Image: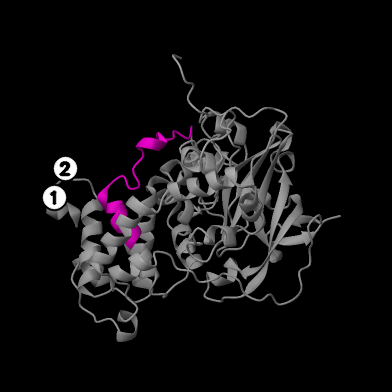
Amino acid sequence: MTKDHHGDTAPPYDIKLSVKALESLLVEKGLVDPEAVDALIELFQNDIGPSNGKRVVARAWVDGGFKRWLLDDPNAAIASMRYVGSQGEQLRVLENTADVHNLVVCTLCSCYPWPLLGLPPVWYKSPPYRAQAVADPRGVMRQFGTEIGEEKEVRVWDSTSEMRYLVLPQRPPDTEGWREEELQNLVTRNSMIGVEDAQRPAKTGTS
Amino acid sequence: MNGVHDLGGMQGFGPVRPELESEEPVFHAEWEGRVYAMVRLIGSLKLWNLDMVRHTRESLPPADYLAFSYYEIWFAALRKQLVESGLVTEDELRTGRASSAVSEVILERVMRAEQVRAKPFMTASYRRPAPGPARFVPGDRVRARNRHPRGHTREPRYVRGRIGTIDAHYGSQVYPDLSADGVVEGRHLYSVRFAARELWGESAHVNSAVYVDLWEDYLEAAP
């Protein structure tokens, strides 16, 4: 089909054109509202992303009561901040401590806590990460520049069900007295997946 | 099914190569966003469930699954499901022109932009009653059964035959192996902890464990 339209030099399959063709067909049949497509894309580009998770983590760092609630009854705790499970999934929050480091993967597909982190990065969905994370988590983290001490236990969580996992990274040192909004800037998406620790405060002065 | 989607522990895919977090766009091309949204919107018509979607993606030819980008997999599976469900005919897919009408019942379910903005996530629960009481409690030793079903399953190959410990009981939730065939029943779901060395042998780090969510039908008591 594509050959007829584009001549011999065209690739055998043009994804952009195929997607456009399917969308017009679905719109013509009344099955898809193109404005709903736009709305969903805008939501994930602008509103639903890791900043939701950053707010949850920073709050847990400053508020011990909220942290306990988040660990004991995460769905209720995030609901209090108006976040929900995207498709009825339940959340479990995994706390990194001095002794334990947690890392999340979905070896079978790409399960990920959408309402708190948005859509997963390409690497999270890719075969290299899905293949290696369960077998060699320390090696995977090293590819992100993260070195986990020998004495620490590394726990890998394979999201094979509709449970969703969020890592609560350790609060970085030298942040005593920081406000919640300042702490949010130290929480990265990657630290909530577990491939990195939260960022450390930039040193003041000349270094 | 023992498909190429079941990637845990496979080798030879090369390094992870993450993009810089601050620079990675949500979608890398416009068509990716269109595919994502179409899959979600057509999914909300409830003509199929999540496990059917997963099984359709897993059942793509293995070479395609590995060669396709993520949203190409979504797109290929969507086309397949549109035809299999009768929503779109092969002919319509080929010509790009509508030649059959959709029933009113389905058209009434089509999501509008306001609805999407008001409620971007579906919140149906996955909890369903189990046929009986839970067989295991946290601390129990269990073996992941050595099963190789031809249909959909969420028991990854790398745990089959391996011994672990029940970490938590998550209640009774929709059982994917049946749900992919349209039979929605609950089974007890557990978090099971496996020592890395039990899964990967002596080369694994001694201070490492893998937690996998496994339904009761995947498990048997271990001595």
- Of all chains, the one bearing label 2 is A
| Residue furthest front in the image | A177
| Residue denoted by label 2 | A9
Could you confirm whether marks 1 and 2 are on the same chain? yes
Specify the amino acid type for callout 2: Thr
Residue A36 falls in image quadrant: bottom left
> Which mark is drawn over residue B78?
none
How crowded pointer 2 is (Cα within 10 Å; few <14, some 14-19, many 20+) is rated as few
In-image side of B17 versus B127 (left or right): left
Q: Is residue A192 visible?
A: yes
Name the residue carrying label 1: A6
Name the chain under label 1: A
In the rendered image, the residue lying farthest to the top is A206
* Quadrant where the image shows the N terminus of chain A: bottom left
Amino acid type at image mark 1? His
Q: Is residue B72 visible?
A: no
Contact between marks 1 and 2 (CB within 8 A): the answer is yes
* Identity of the residue drawn at 58% across and 62% down: A76
The one of B3 and B37 positioned closer to us in this rendering: B37
Residue A108 in percent (x, y) is at 54, 52
Residue A86 as seen in the image, left or right of residue A21: right
Is B218 magenta? The answer is: no
| Label 1 neighbour load within 10 Å: few <14, some 14-19, many 20+ | few
Residue B120, by quadrant, is: bottom left
Residue stretch rendered in magenta on the structure: B15-37
Residue A30's place in the image compared with B96, above or below, is below
Q: Position of residue B32 (x, y in %)?
A: 31, 52
